[in-house]
Amino acid sequence: MCGIAGIMNRSGAAPGDAVLQALTKALAHRGPDGQGRVISGATGLVHTRLAIIDLETGDQPLFASQNTEKQEAGTGGTRTGTKQEARTGETRTGTKKAALIANGEIYNYIELKLDMGRVEFRTGSDCEPPLHLYLRHGLDFPRHLRGMYAIAIYDPAEDSLVLARDPFGIKPLYYAETAEGLAFASEPQALFLAGLVKPVLRPEARNELLQLQFTTGAGTVFEGVHRLLPGETVQVRGGRVTDRLSRKALPDGGPIEVSQSAALRRLDEVLSDSVNIHQRSDVPYGMFLSGGIDSSALLAMMSRLNERPVQAFTAGFSGTDVADERQLARAVAEAAGADHTEVEFSEEDFWALLPKIAAVMDDPAADYAVLPTYKLAAAAKEAGLKVVLTGEGGDELFGGYGRYRRLRRARLLGGRPMRERGVFDGLGVLRGEPAGWRDGFAKSEQEAAQGGRTKLQAAQAADCADWLPHDLLAKLDRCLMAHGVEGRVPFLDLKVADFALRLPDRLKVRRGRGKWLLRKWLQTALPAALPFARKRGFTVPVGEWIGGRGRELGPLVASRPGIEEICLPNAVEDLFAAAGSGSGRRTGQAAWGLLFYALWHRRHIEGLEAQGGVFDVLGDKG
């Protein structure tokens, strides 16, 4: 995994060295193994590398020429003109040249190289085929790719910049159009640190964050900073977006009838295929194991496909009221013959690490799963791993969430729409009712319901459009990349999605349980996972921890500038005092949301460094 960034100036002037240096420095944590740069005309691209595939010759940028279909291995050095290009041996006889930088993995790169016949590949990099595909197919090149990626290609012959993001939005990419031109980066904070954009809060996105705990659509929480949406490819000319294409992650249409036995056979095929290609790596890899269905299914398949024991990591919470998954995970790991590491996330970790975690979540998601994910990533790095496989996407594609089951019930039987109520509704904490906080998600719901989908399919598709990329995958990307670890998600594969979304509803939800087909498969593949046992949902005891120090914490949170402008101070103090005291899950969730937001706002809007633990940071007025 890597960091990418770049600039296309409107003036025609070459980007300044100081700006490119600042972008590189801001993304160094994403790519500790090397740096590269190319400047051509008014465009500059920078790359920081986490070496996973082709450790020797895979440095970026990568270069190719259309006529000769030849490419020089990137050396990580600066290329600023034709004289230096000639000196490094880059082919100059083609009528169309291009340079590529990428963040991600192209899992079908071996098959692509075979399909491309006479092309002479000069590296073993998985990111070389996309460059040649662009030279052949133009903006349509991503339809050939199977993987997770954010790609930037500069084409001097067209004087155009092309940006592309994978269909699920596994890897992030952000851009800003300013009076000077267009700038892009893997993380918004890089644009701020390079002085290209100022971090100004968008109130409507802040309302979404408070009520949903994530934000929706192309607009971020920052004014003028946009997400390239999942599956989008854009062309930039003269520092402006001039063309935009989109590739869907999910198939259209309603369910396709299939028997359970046939569906189980097909599930085994697609899961085996996806896990197999997601293990392509020239460095050691492992996986994150919870006591849940998704990660247990991954472990079952990884154990089948690997000769050596799988390295598995599980987080747990001792001495709290929440379910600790380590006991079940331990049994599952033992049954699968895995090398199992248990990672304790304690209350002391909560108070010490939360400011650092809020700092890495520049595109914020107030999902308390960031806490164990951050520490699991540190444990994986300490164990010498650069790659981990995780179970994100299993609930969305196979129908696992309880909200899907509630959605299908009548109102009289407890049914209700997804995210009908915001976190702060009825609590009397905010100064006013947040306006429009559900509009973005409602738009996704409306679009997801098209094409003859069932109510369940539409709910899955809506989650895949917003919740998945802007919460779960953003959390995974930032927490892992903060430690130089790559996260891979085998469930979020186009072939898996084509199969799973069009399963009949009865093979997703049955007898009050979601993920029915995946449970049936796991019942045979790894019975120790107890796939049909009643389990408590995953949670982190944030309400309990906050409640224990709520009276001390409340005034500190209430006095922060980001909180004062949106909340009633006395109500904030009362909320924190009541958290964890049996006043209900929503109270603890709301207190957690404000605590996270206060720390996030302090770092990313006020621009203050996060030194020390929660009380040190909140007590420091900067």
Image (cartoon, helix red, strand yellow):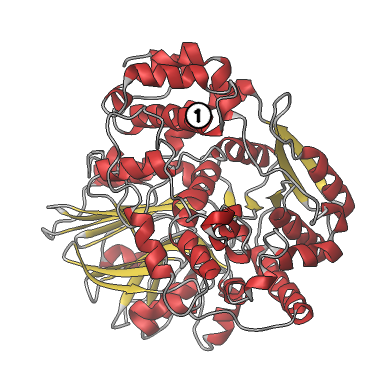
Callout 1 environment at 10 Å: few (<14), some (14 to 19), or many (20+)? many
Q: Tell me the residue at 65%/51% (across/down).
A: 388
Q: Which residue is mark 1?
A: 587
Residue sticking out furthest to the bottom: 117
Residue 10 x, y percent position in the rendering? 13, 59
Let me know if residue 157 appears in the view.
yes
Q: Is residue 552 left or right of residue 585?
A: left
Q: Is residue 1 left or right of residue 223?
A: right
Q: Tell me the residue at 46%/31% (across/down).
A: 590
Q: Tell me the residue at 24%/60% (across/down).
A: 43
Q: Quadrant of residue 398?
A: bottom right
**Is 311 placed above or below 326 here?**
below
Along the viewing direction, whichever of 610 and 391 lies nearer the viewer: 391
Residue 602 x, y percent position in the rendering? 34, 26
Along the viewing direction, whichever of 122 and 187 lies nearer the viewer: 187
Residue 180 x, y percent position in the rendering? 14, 52
Q: Residue type at mark 1: give it.
A: Thr
**Is 327 placed above or below 1 here?**
above
Along the viewing direction, whichever of 479 and 46 lies nearer the viewer: 479
Q: Is residue 317 left or right of residue 492?
A: right
Residue 270 x, y percent position in the rendering? 68, 74
